Image (spheres, rainbow, N blue to C red):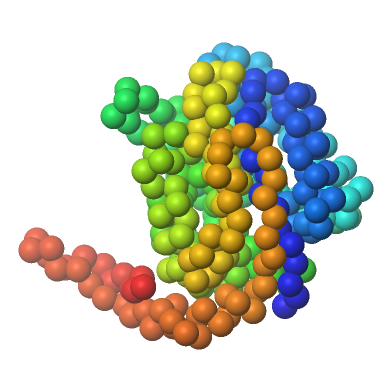
């Protein structure tokens, strides 16, 4: 497994997919210029649009999406793996998917991932989000190869469901991805600790490209894109909410080394739960 440079692109996507695609292109080119061969953009790279009617007018099918076509061309031109953290895609059934794309250095599609866990929450500051009202959740976790490393997919709110990352680690993922558009409130409270926890629990690198700042649709996101190593150390951070690029070296052998030191993936045991009202089904242990 070879060492490679990875980049996380921090954006402040607005309501225009064309303008966001141009911003993405500029930042991806910067990342490639800095030596990154794997580049990740945030959740909803294509557009952040809170109004459902405006979103319906802006979002389109994969074959017509400007972010998808721009990213595919960039991957081929720059000879990189380009991971669009997600963008809204109109499915054949008329529903929207919050979909990630990974493009290969030849421009081909390596994998797609539809966000599984929907952000349906009511926050203390009055913010209320119902992602499931607009998007159809995915049902399949994805792990794929990128130049000898194995990459596991997730998007934003998926971060709060450790069983997804454990399943991907057990499937061989050395690198876990969490492109996101975390709200400022939840980001200040939990962003760093959750990303470091997922890295430590699974002995894996975590790469998390984020949205940051005050967006055109009125939402405010936390920024602070991170790359965390398998021992839980932050090895690159955008310590702000401005657009930009962070780069770090990824050595998949360090994932294997961390798992040898603390072999919790091997040591997990099945167990049952007795909650006083009968025995629940057997579960797979997630010791850390």
User: In the picture, residue 262 is in which quadrant?
Assistant: bottom left
- Please tell me which residue is depicted at 47% across the width and 56% down the height of the picture: 195
User: In the picture, residue 200 is in which quadrant?
Assistant: bottom left
Left or right: residue 172 compared with residue 126: right
Residue 21 vs 107, above or below: the answer is above
| Residue lying at the far top of the rendered structure | 53
Q: Is 238 in front, or is 193?
A: 238
Residue 138 in sight: no
Q: Quadrant of the C terminus?
A: bottom left
Q: Is 147 in front, or is 208?
A: 208
Residue 206 vs 71, above or below: the answer is below
| Residue lying at the far left of the rendered structure | 276
Q: Residue 118's x, y, as percent?
A: 44, 39
Left or right: residue 111 compared with residue 164: right
Residue 279 in sight: yes
Marks counted in the figure total: 0
Q: Residue 180's x, y, as percent?
A: 55, 42
- Please tell me which residue is depicted at 64% across the width and 29% down the height of the picture: 13
- Please tell me which residue is depicted at 64% across the width and 79% down the height of the picture: 253
Q: Quadrant of the N terminus?
A: bottom right
Q: Is 106 in front, or is 9?
A: 9
User: In the picture, residue 87 is in which quadrant?
Assistant: top right
| Residue lying at the far right of the rendered structure | 77
Q: Residue 158's x, y, as percent?
A: 47, 49
Left or right: residue 54 compared with residue 265: right
- Please tell me which residue is depicted at 75% across the width and 75% down the height of the picture: 2
Left or right: residue 6 compared with residue 194: right
Q: Residue 221's x, y, as percent?
A: 51, 32
Q: Is 177 in front, or is 108?
A: 177
């Amino acid at each position: 497994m070879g060492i490679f440079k990875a980049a996380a692109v921090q954006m402040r996507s607005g309501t225009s997919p064309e303008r966001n695609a141009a911003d993405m292109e500029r930042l991806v080119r910067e990342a490639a210029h800095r030596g990154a061969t794997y580049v990740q953009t945030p959740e909803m790279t294509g557009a952040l649009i809170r109004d459902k009617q405006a979103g319906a007018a802006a979002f389109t099918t994969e074959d017509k999406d400007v972010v998808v076509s721009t990213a595919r061309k960039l991957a081929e031109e720059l000879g990189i793996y380009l991971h669009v953290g997600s963008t809204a895609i109109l499915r054949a059934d008329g529903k929207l998917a919050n979909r990630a794309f990974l493009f290969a250095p030849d421009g081909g599609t390596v994998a797609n991932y539809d966000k599984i866990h929907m952000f349906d929450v009511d926050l203390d500051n009055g913010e209320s989000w119902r992602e499931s009202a607009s998007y159809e959740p995915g049902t399949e976790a994805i792990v794929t190869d990128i130049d000898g490393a194995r990459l596991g997919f997730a998007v934003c709110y998926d971060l709060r469901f450790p069983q997804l990352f454990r399943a991907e680690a057990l499937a061989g993922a050395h690198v876990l991805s969490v492109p996101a558009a975390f709200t400022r409130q939840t980001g200040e409270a939990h962003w760093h600790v959750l990303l470091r926890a997922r890295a430590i629990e699974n002995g894996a690198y975590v790469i998390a490209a984020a949205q940051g700042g005050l967006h055109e649709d009125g939402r405010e996101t936390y920024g602070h894109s991170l790359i965390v190593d398998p021992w839980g150390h932050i090895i690159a951070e955008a310590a702000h909410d401005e657009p930009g690029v962070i780069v770090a070296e990824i050595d998949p052998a360090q994932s294997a080394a961390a798992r040898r030191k603390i072999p919790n993936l091997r040591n997990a045991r099945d167990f049952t739960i007795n909650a006083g009202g009968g025995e629940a089904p057997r579960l797979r242990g997630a010791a850390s």
